[in-house]
Structure formats: C-alpha cells, structure tokens
Image: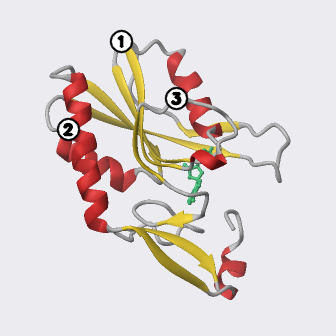
Amino acid sequence: MPGESMQQCARMPESLETLISQADLQDRIESLAEEIRRDYGDQQMLLVGVLKGSYLFLADLSRRLGGNVAIDFVQTSSYGAEKSSSGVVQIRKDLDINIEGQNVLLVEDIVDTGLTLTHLRELLSVRKPNSLKVVSLLSKPEARVHQTQIEYVGFEIPNAFVVGYGLDYSERYRNLPYIAILRPE
Ligand code: IMP
C-alpha cells in the first residue's frame, strides 16, 4: 500500500478501523512525558522530530515535557527493496542545530523494519551528542528486520498499515486525531 500513486489510491475504496483512540493517545503521551522528565531531570534536552510523521506527537509531547527543551527536525527518504537493493536511508532535510554535547531525544512516529532508525542513530551519534535516546509513539515488533534500541515506546501494535495522528497514506489522514488501521475494501 505505501508508495502507491494518488491515482491508484483514488480508485481504491478504503476503510478505517480505530486502533488507538484520541483519549488513549493523550493519556499515554502524558505518562511518557512524565517518565522522560523523570529520567532527564532539569537537564536541557533537544527534541529532534523526524518529519513528517512525528509532527503531532512532537507537538503534544513537547508541551507536556515543559522545562528546558529545544526543538529541531530532520527528514529522511528511504528507498525500499522495490527501488534499490541497498535499502539506503538518505537525509532530505538535515538538522539546523549543532548537536555536539547535547542531550538528544529523537522523536519518531513509528518504527517498522527499523531501517530508518538504525541509520538515524548512526548519523546522529557520530556528531558527538552528550546522550542520544529515542522515543517512538508506535512500534511494530513483528515487522522488525534491523534490530535497534528504542528507549521509550508509546504503543506496540500489530503488523498492519496504520494512519492518523501524523501518519499518512499518500499524504492523507495525517490530521486524524486517533490511530486507525487502513484497509482496502
Ligand atoms: P522503517 O524504516 O521500516 O522502520 O519505517 C519507518 C517509516 O516508515 C516511518 O517513519 C513511516 O514514515 C513509515 N511507516 C512504517 N509503517 C507505517 C504505517 O503503518 N503507516 C504509515 N507509515 C508507516
């Protein structure tokens, strides 16, 4: 389903099945923020949102973290097996901030195969941050191909294609306030 053209998408009827409600999302983000704030204390942290999928999660998480928080964004583009045998992740938009010596918390929407996160961890760790941790709203453990560390996980979900709360299908559904499984009808 990912990667299909808008034309194909327009022809195919889809249905949405709620997987995580708006209330459950907000409750979990509140508890994640408490856990993160407990771990970091009053140290400054730099939240690095991975565009575009993390934009709503980062907005809600950052408001609940309070305290000493800076924000930057990175955007990647990945070429899956159908386009390239190497599975390379490229940087489409790099950070604006120098992260050397900073406590970086990478904010991901979802970890699927783990390819993107593996590359981002490598890319950021060579820039010598003081610490580098990851928070991902969603994780699909059954889909993992590249094992990678995720310090904070919002929800472990089944291996289904989900949309909403930042996650898209052909750029649609990002603005849903909940997470839904997208199925072709
Ligand atoms: P990974 O590199 O395979 O872990 O994939 C990470 C990226 O794939 C995420 O940041 C999303 O942009 C996209 N992705 C993976 N699974 C889904 C999904 O179920 N819905 C929408 N996007 C997804």
Mark nearer the N terminus (3 vs 1): 1
Residue wearing tag 3: 149
Q: Residues within 10 Å of mark 1 (few under 14, many from 20)?
A: few
Image quadrant where one finds the C terminus: bottom right
Q: Which amino acid does label 3 sit on?
A: Gln
As shown in the figure, which amino acid type bears the numbered disc 1? Gly
Front: mark 3 or 1? 3
Q: Is mark 3 on a helix, strand or loop?
A: loop
Residue 101 is labelled as: 1
Three-letter amino acid code at disc 2?
Glu
Q: What element carries label 1?
A: loop
Secondary structure under tag 2 reads helix
Which image quarter: residue 169? bottom right
Residue at x-position 50% and y-position 55%: 157
Give the labeled residue for mark 2.
34
The Cα atoms of the two marked residues, 1 and 2, are separated by 24 Å
**Picture quarter containing residue 136?**
top left
Please report contact status of discs 3 and 1: CB closer than 8 Å, yes or no: no
Tell me which residue sits at (69%, 87%) in the image: 11
Give the label, 1 or 2, closer to the camera: 2
x 39%, y 62%: residue: 165
> In this view of the protein, which residue sits in the foreground, 39 or 85?
39
Nearer the N terminus, badge 2 or badge 3?
2
The reply to whether the residue tagged 2 has its Cβ within 8 angstroms of ligand 1 is: no
Q: Position of residue 64 (x, y in %)?
A: 18, 45
> Badges 2 and 3: C-beta atoms under 8 Å apart?
no
